[in-house]
Amino acid sequence: MPIAQIAERDLSSEKSKTFVFQDEGHTLGNALRCVISSYPDVQFCGYTVPHPAESKMHFRIQMNKGQAIDALKRGLEDLVKICDHTLEKFDEEMSSYKSDHNLVT
Amino acid sequence: MDTINDEKPRVVLKEHKIIPNMPTRPTIFDDVFDIKVFKKKFSVVIVRYEHYEMEFDLIGIHPSLVNAFRRLILSDVPSMAIEKVHIYNNTTIIQDEVLAHRLGLIPLKADPRLFEYHTDEHADYMENDSLEFELKIKCTFNKELNNSSYDLYKNNNVYSKHIKWLPKGNQSKLLKGIDVGPIHDDILIAKMRPGHELDLKLIAVKSCGRDHAKFSPVATAFYRLLPDIRLVQKVEGEAAERLQKCFSPGVIEIEKNVDGKQVAKVKNARYDMSSRNVYRYDDLKDSVILSKVQDHFIFTVESVGAMASDVIFKEAVHILKNKCLSLLEELQN
């Protein structure tokens, strides 16, 4: 099953694209949108779930310069880094909390 | 008086509106995302941990990400629940389908990480993707009835403790008997009278909350913004007591100062429920500034009991990470 598929009328433009995510929704859509829309070269970034009964998410990126797909890749990579760092911090705090309160790990 | 000058992004709660109070320095809301900046700003504080219930703070993170974690916990972190009920005999007054539904909602003590998803509906249930239970119970008259006992019947109440685990294949070695079965043994499943009988086989599988709410690993998972209360004028005497009543218990403290007057002081704004009751009093409304810190989240996870609450949160973050990794891989091709 395709995870990221590109639905586009005008295939010539690499600057702006709409990606279709199969089996994704607001969870990934909004998190990714918040990361990608902060990039300086991104002119517009938004997502939509076109119909609640279809598990599809449309993700649009419009760039001032550069390719839309690069922004998407960078966004996903940054999201992975956020997750890694969150896990690391959470584990650190959890183990120090447990040792402070004499809890068995 | 309307603004609070510090480095935290806030909203100030006024009587009928909220006013954003953004510091001059860039915050997480207008920064270009940079992992180095994120690492510097982000912190976690564990506030309360009671194994199945925990509260922690996520500080310096965008609300979209916190909301993603919450959504993942509710509907993407898997757990085990009874999915199929084979009814061999049911002579109780509770209907088959109602009984099956009730059984599905019973929280099970089983670590979902040890199991696979049962993907093919027509395939047999195997030891690596399912758990099997049995519920065989019959109600009879209590024959040893004497004057001191009021129990007319035996087994007239069917509880979750009557559910017996039937280990499949190697399961009895891999999972210890005490680790499998209903979490609470006093859940009332059905009521019976002499002659009534239940003979059921129950099959539990792994799935996630998106499929059915019974698979959600938490009773609830939620977050809220850190409230902040500042007293900008001295509030004394009767007014102090009134001020205290405007907030949740424990938020405002009344101290006696040197000349014996009662003075209100903010003790702990964290557990305030942010009602705006102060605005009902004209003499009090200008003496206090209510605000919320927009990048400080108080996250609460209440586990159903199969997994510890910290494990559930970590699983959620792992799921988001793996989602991104598999999408990246897809994009490479």
Image (tube, rainbow, N blue to C red):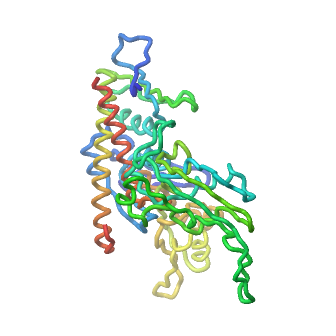
Q: In the image shown, does B14 or B125 lie closer to the viewer?
A: B125
Q: Is residue B302 visible?
A: no
From this view, report whether residue B214 is shown above or below residue A9.
below
Quarter of the rendering containing residue B243: bottom right
- Position in image of residue B73 (x %, y %): 45, 50
From this view, report whether residue B148 is shown above or below residue B98.
below
- Position in image of residue B322 (x %, y %): 34, 40
Residue at the image position 35 percent from the left and 27 percent from the top: A42
Q: Is residue B330 visible?
A: yes
**Residue lying at the far left of the rendered structure:** B36
**Residue lying at the far front of the rendered structure:** B143
Q: In the image shown, does B289 or B297 lie closer to the viewer?
A: B297
Q: In the image shown, does B138 or B77 lie closer to the viewer?
A: B138
Residue at the image position 41 percent from the left and 26 percent from the top: A1
- Position in image of residue B33 (x %, y %): 31, 39
Residue A82 is left or right of residue B190, and the answer is left
Residue B245 is left or right of residue B38, and the answer is right
- Position in image of residue B86 (x %, y %): 60, 49
Residue at the image position 74 percent from the left and 68 percent from the top: B194
